[in-house]
Image: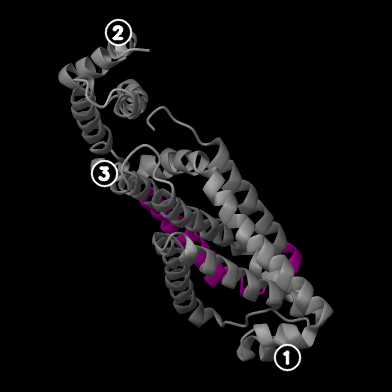
Amino acid sequence: MTATEFIAKKQETWDELEALLNHSRRASADRLNRLGYLYRRVTSDLAVARRDFPQDRCVPYLNALASRAHSAVYQTSPFKRGTLRQFLLFGFPKVFRENLSFIGASFLMFAISFASAYWIALSTPELGEKIVPDRFVSHIKKLEEGAWNDTSAENRNLFASFVMTNNIRVAFFAFAGGIIFMVGTAYILVLNGIVIGAVAGLCHTNGVALALWSFVSPHGYIELTTIFIAGGAGLKLGYSLIAPSSFTRKRTLTDAAKTAIQLLGGCVALLVVAGIIEGFVSPSSLLPSVKIGFGALTGVLLFTYLFAMKARFF
């Protein structure tokens, strides 16, 4: 295909995008959807033009058009427009679904580490005790049929605040670690998987698995899922540095960072919910069966939200 044929074939799309940028200022749902679609088409065309027709006049034209469209698309991002409520309801689930490959990879890193450590602690408790911090080993051995955490009612507010802060910190580290070519993110996910897996294995060995799972279940579905999402955001950052595709490494990293920050923003909101539950429901005196059932309900609601919430605004 010659440059002339390429331009003739793609000109209609370019003209439509230019007209949309020139004449439509209203951020309607239809306009945003169409603008995003045409922007992706033009950036793809730009990559082809740079590769096949680097000296042709269409390259600077497409570069300018893509830059204008990029500004229009991202100036209407949920955080800049202030539509935080719509982002949390619809935008975050959409970004989650669009990045399932990275989030799935994050989950696998954790799950394999968890399963390995669980098996080690189950088959060789002495080795498992070397993996887990001493204070947890001591706590596990003192447990009987009581709750995993005996936080008093007056201290639960403080405990909830501590849990939120700690979990947000872990999520941030999992996210930020991706900038080291995914190594930091992988380290955080694997380390947490090993420690949590070893704790679970030791609880099973010591006959207090129910005490652990009745404590973890109410908040665990939300908490772990957000860690996987934050890890997926970190992996996306790192992957953009390793495989920058058709654009420069800086441009690819910038685009990946915008998506990753949206993922992290949604994680923070979910971790606030998880922290409240962990501070008030998980250490409560409710029956283990009630806590486990409550946790299962939060899991159903969470995955319904992530996979089913759709709107035309994003």
Give the overall secondary structure of the magenta segment. Answer: helix
Spatial separation of the CA atoms under disc 3 and disc 2: 40 Å
Q: Amino acid at mark 3?
A: Gly
Q: Which residues are magenta?
A: 261-290
Residue at (39% x, 63% y) in the render: 176
Q: Amino acid at mark 1?
A: Lys
| Residue wearing tag 1 | 142
Asked which quadrant contains residue 213, the reply is bottom right
In this rendering, the label closer to the viewer, 3 or 2? 2
Q: Is residue 152 above or below residue 255?
A: below
In this rendering, the label closer to the viewer, 2 or 1? 2
Secondary element under disc 1, as helix, strand or loop, is helix
| Residue wearing tag 3 | 82
Spatial separation of the CA atoms under disc 2 and disc 1: 76 Å
- Image coords of residue 29 (percent x, y): 34, 25
Residue 243 vs residue 235, the one in the foreground: 243
